[in-house]
Image (cartoon, rainbow, N blue to C red):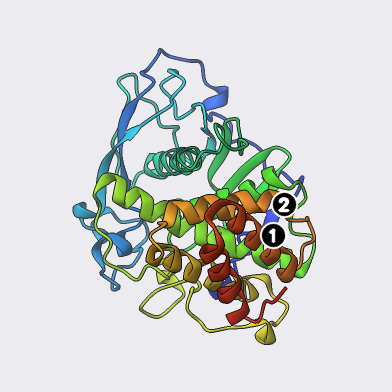
Amino acid sequence: MHIRRWLSLLVVPGVVAGLAVAGGPQSQAKPGGGPSTGSGLVFMVNPVQSSGDESLTDQNDSAAAVPESAYASVPIRNLDGSGYLRGTWATVDSATGTPAYSSTGVYDYDRHQDQFEQVMGYFWVNQAQEYLQSLGFGSTLPPILNSPFSVKIDQFGGDNSYETTKPFRIRLGKGGVDDAEDAEVIVHEYGHAVHQSQVPGFGTSPDAGSIGEAFGDYFGVSVGLAAAQQYGWPVRAEQACPMDWDSTSYTDAPHCIRRFDTGLTVADRIGEVHFDGQIWSQALWEIRLGYVRLGLGTKAWDTTLIASQFGYAADTSFAAAARQTYDTALARDGRKAADLVRQRFAARGISF
């Protein structure tokens, strides 16, 4: 579960904890249609990232705890027309409080209202899927999570979130800063589902579990930065620092749940997947920076990384996964990119 610094964010294969709340959207009569594209207010990834203000605190969901400038109005796409937050790629199927509903497609709430987190959950899962599609997954590359993804909001009382596979869904907790208020938490969980979609049962060895946590952290940051570029949002906090809003309740400033620049190597492993995952995530981050220097760009690296994961074994080792990533980089991006991949993994003590 959520153990402060290491935030469990577990994959729970085949386990569905809890039932839909009575009166949730799936149990309500449809009062009338809504548009397929609406609008709503979300955090620009999270309030710490967009403001750079490390002094922000939760204050028990107070609207006054976060400045109005932390919100952005965004398009809410791919809705099914029911007026609820259900659509092609995301479905808020259970939540604390009244389900968000709009016959006009306008979902404007603040963080003091339960519906705000529902909008966050829907928007960021949809955004993550749209990012995968922008990389070619589902067109030139195999699809990933090619169906509506279930999101449960505030259904877990602890400060933790997790993903299950049968069916695919995430449950976002409400301890400390509610997890659905930080896009990097939401997308981290979706990252677990990405792995499970690509390699069913992924994560059955310590190294594979660490890779899963590392990819979730990296994917959360990458999707958030891509959205900031897409919508013109400010990024004023450290980029190599995931979940800086969620972690305000249990870390010192600058707030990060984990980091991509710890300098850890395989010699530092302690057998805890969140800690050990920082070995893998630092390699991913440094390769990302190297792809930019090579003129290939971050989207080329994200495409290669995610494409390589189709070839990982469910119980992969660091070395085997690094070799698969290297081979994919060589085939897709050429010798210089592949050499970069090998070098950055080797710097973390991962050789093949």
Q: Residue at 65% of width from left, 64% of height from top?
A: 211
The part of the image, by quadrant, that contains residue 113 is top left
Which circle marks residue 62 in the picture? none
Residue type, label 2: Gly
Q: Is residue 38 visible?
A: yes
Whether residue 200 sits left or right of residue 36 in the image: it is: right
Residue 196 shown left or right of residue 299 in the figure: right
**Residue 158 vertical position relative to residue 128 in the rendered view, above or below:** below
Q: Residue furthest front?
A: 335
Near-viewer residue (55 or 113) = 55
Q: Can residue 174 be seen by looking at this rendering? A: no
Residue 92 at x, y = what percent?
A: 51, 35
In the foreground, 30 or 132:
132
Q: Secondary structure at mark 2?
A: helix
In which quadrant is the N terminus drawn? Answer: bottom right
Left or right? Give the position of 125 relative to 275: left
Q: Is residue 235 above or below residue 116?
A: below
Kindly check if marks 1 and 2 are in contact, taking CB atoms under 8 A apart as contact. yes
Cα distance, mark 1 to mark 2?
7 Å
Q: Which residue is mark 2?
A: 311
Please tell me whether mark 1 sits on a helix, a strand or a loop.
helix
Tell me the residue at 68%/45% (across/down).
Answer: 198
Q: Amino acid at mark 1?
A: Gln
Residue 39 % position (x, y): 30, 31
- Give the percent coordinates (x, y) of residue 97: 46, 39
Residue to which mark 1 is pinned: 324
